[in-house]
Amino acid sequence: MPSEPTIFIVDDDQAVRESLTFLLQAEGLAVECYASAQAFLEGYDPEKTGCLLLDIHMPGMNGREMIPLLAALRIDLPVIVITGHGDGELARELMREGIADCLEKPFSRGLLLETIYRVLRQENADGRT
Amino acid sequence: MAAGEGQTWLERGVEIAQRRLEKFRRQIDELPAECRDLSMEIAEELATNLEELSVAMEELSAQNQELLISRQAVEVERQRYQDLFDLAPDGYLVTTESGQIKELNQAAEHLFRKRRQYLLGKPLAVLVAKKDHGLFYTLLDRLRKKAVLPNVELHLQINRTRPPLLVALTVAACRHEGQEERNLRWLMRDISNQKQAQERFRQLQAELVHVARLSALGGMASGLAHELNQPLTAIVSYTQTAQQLLDSGACPPEKLHEALDQVGAQGLRAGEIIRRIRAFARPNESRREAVDINAVIQGLMPLVEWQAQRHQVDIRTDLAEGLPTVSGDVIQIQQVLLNLITNACEAFQDRTGQREIVLRTARAGTAKIETTVTDNGPGITAEIIEQIFNPFFTTKPKGMGIGLDISRSIIEAHGGRLWVTSKPAEGASFRFILPVKAKDR
């Protein structure tokens, strides 16, 4: 039974986490924040569905390193990469590595929500439980 | 008989006397017997004397010739020395002990822009700029005891319209044989161009240091842009959400306040990042203030975090507590640290394994603080260590090679020392010491 989706935010910058939380909660979405890839991998509740907003440049394990680990740990969340590094090349590579989408900071509220809803719809359409 | 060429009147006289003697000798036979013997003796003596006189005169003539040649040689030498003196590239003067001008050469005329005739006999003090009169008289005084005063810088005032001219002079006291008083010999060179060139060099050096900073900043551009994107992301999210809340009508004021507070705070955060960039990019006249090295290192962390992440390097700090301050220029010290850290990050290249840089500060004796940037990269060979601080030496394909040269100049200008210790395969440590600010010791 599909539960309410949770948006997981993994970004080392506090202001980014807090502002996106503010934005998504105003939309009525459930939000969970992690300051590092490590913290997310340790704290993620496998019962929950939704999607992942993932930053790339973080100290310790960076976002890119975490992507294959998600597969290895059977974490099925679709990944939306949010990056402050405007690299089209990076975006293309990441898409090839199987992420759902890539947004460049700063992005408008409208674009973020549109992307999240699209990705969630895609998930449901793919029939995941 | 007329006098031959080169004959003096004396030689002519001797010649005539010899002829008259001949004539007398021929007439001796007609003399009475009592006179004949005596006359012959006298005639013989006279002949001998005349002969000797003739020989003496030849010798005298030869000596005169030699004397003439000597004199000519002396004159040639004298002229040669006069020319050396006169045409020397630097100004030469000879004055009395009290500074009255006795002789000067062409270069001195040129230097003073006055003809010799106008200057001879005048006191040299007349040409010295007012502000250096004291110095001039002190020189004269000291020359009474010391024989030579080398490399003194003095300002001349040639005329009222021109600005003072800076000359470097060497002056020596000497006494000639047979003279009561001593003379002073002055050597003067116009160094105003040289001073200008030195000043220009200092300017260019400062510009180079600045350019290196800009270059470092350029390398950090991506990282800085990334830094700025964070607060911008927050600002956009908060404002657009606030607008949405207002539009929806269901907008509790405290939510709006929260959003707007954050927008302000993030705007200031972005402003602070920009302020830091600006401060670093500014050309700066070296300042000396009390600098807390640990604070500088910590302030640098945001700037280097991004670089460290890009190279996947962990940066650790090991900062001693309670360190005294050093007297220095914050921006320039930051520049050095940034240079060392950037180099360390780039040193790893394709090395695998845990990449680590450690920033350490510690006291080195009572009066110095040592800062170390250590990496566990491939290390540096002895050959490269020898050259690594040379300008334009680089091991990087796109490197300019001036970073370490400038870093060393900066540290040395602070009265410190920058060096590296490394063994291949054992990483490298760049260390610099800075003297503690005097009051703080």
Image (tube, coloured by chain):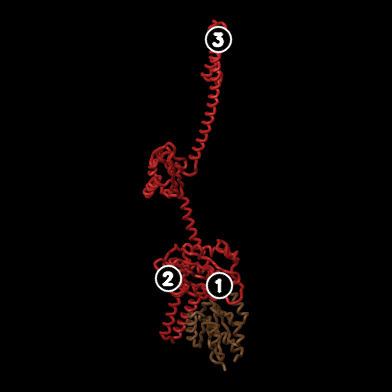
Chain colours: A brown, B red
Q: For mark 2, name the chain.
A: B
For marks 1 and 2, the one nearer the N-term is 2
The residue identified by callout 1 is B375
Provide residue B333's location: percent of width, then percent of height: 47, 67
Label 2 sits on residue: B324
Protein chain holding label 3: B
Identify the residue under disc 3.
B37
Mark in front: 2 vs 3: 3
The spot of residue A108 in percent (x, y) is 51, 79
As rendered, which of B238 and B161 lies closer to the eye? B161
Q: Give the Cα separation between the discs numbered 2 and 3.
A: 124 Å
In which quadrant of the rendered view does residue A51 lie?
Answer: bottom right
| Disc 1 and disc 2 in contact, CB within 8 angstroms | no
Work out which quarter of the rendered image holds the C terminus of chain B and state it: bottom left
Identified by mark 3, the residue type is Asp
Question: Quick one: quadrant of the N terminus of chain B?
Answer: top right
Q: Would you place residue A34 above or below residue B361 in this image?
A: below
Residue B81 image position (x, y, % from top left): 50, 38
Helix, strand or loop for disc 2: loop
What secondary structure is found at the residue carrying circle 1?
Answer: strand
- At label 1, the amino acid type is Asp
Circle 2 residues within 10 Å: few <14, some 14–19, many ≥20: many
